[in-house]
Amino acid sequence: MVELVVRVEAEVYPTESPEKVVEAVEKIFPKINSQIRWLDDSAVVEGSSTSLESLETLKRLLKERRIRAAARRILKESVTGDELTFYLNKEAAYAGKVSFAEPFIESPLPPIKVTIKSSELEEVIEWLTERSAP
């Protein structure tokens, strides 16, 4: 059993509905209990999990979109020590799709930030992007 901590965070812009941002996060990570944290006049949707199962929908969507090889490359390039950080397009997530993003570059809205901490990141990446997945 792989030990890990998955943390998901999405800044909510004033033009966005916090509930829709929660919905976007939960379409990709339905097993992570997301909540809205209010900061003065802004909000952040965040959630965390210690279960590999919390990444199952992401794994399925990578397979369905047939982007596992590209995802493997992006994920491997996003590892620093025992931490993997990558970003997902919020609008795509709301539509139930996975699209990797750069932080605050490709979209007028901030992306969903996903951080995975584990001493076994190579195994996590291989599991997420395995070619022979059923």
Image: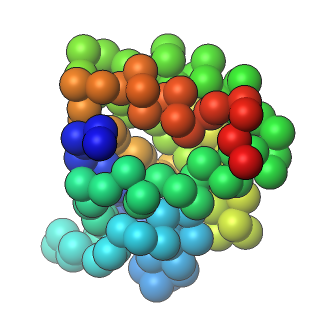
- Seen in the image, is 99 located left or right of residue 53? right
Residue at image coords 70%, 53%: 61
Quick one: 48 or 11, which is closer to the camera?
Answer: 48
Give the number of marks.
Answer: 0
- Determine the residue positioned at 53% across, 27% down: 126
Which quadrant of the figure contains the N terminus?
top left
Question: Camera-side residue: 2 or 55?
Answer: 2
Percent across and percent down for residue 22 are 45, 76
Question: Would you place residue 24 above or below residue 126 in this image?
Answer: below
Residue drawn 51% across the image and 49% down it = 111
Q: Is residue 107 visible?
A: no
Which quadrant of the structure image shows residue 72? Answer: top right
Residue 19 visible in image: yes
Position in image of residue 17 (x %, y %): 50, 81
Residue 122 in the figure: left or right of residue 120: right
Q: Is residue 125 above or below residue 100?
A: above
Question: How far across and how far down the image is residue 133, in percent?
Answer: 69, 41
Say if 78 sits above or below 89 in the image.
above
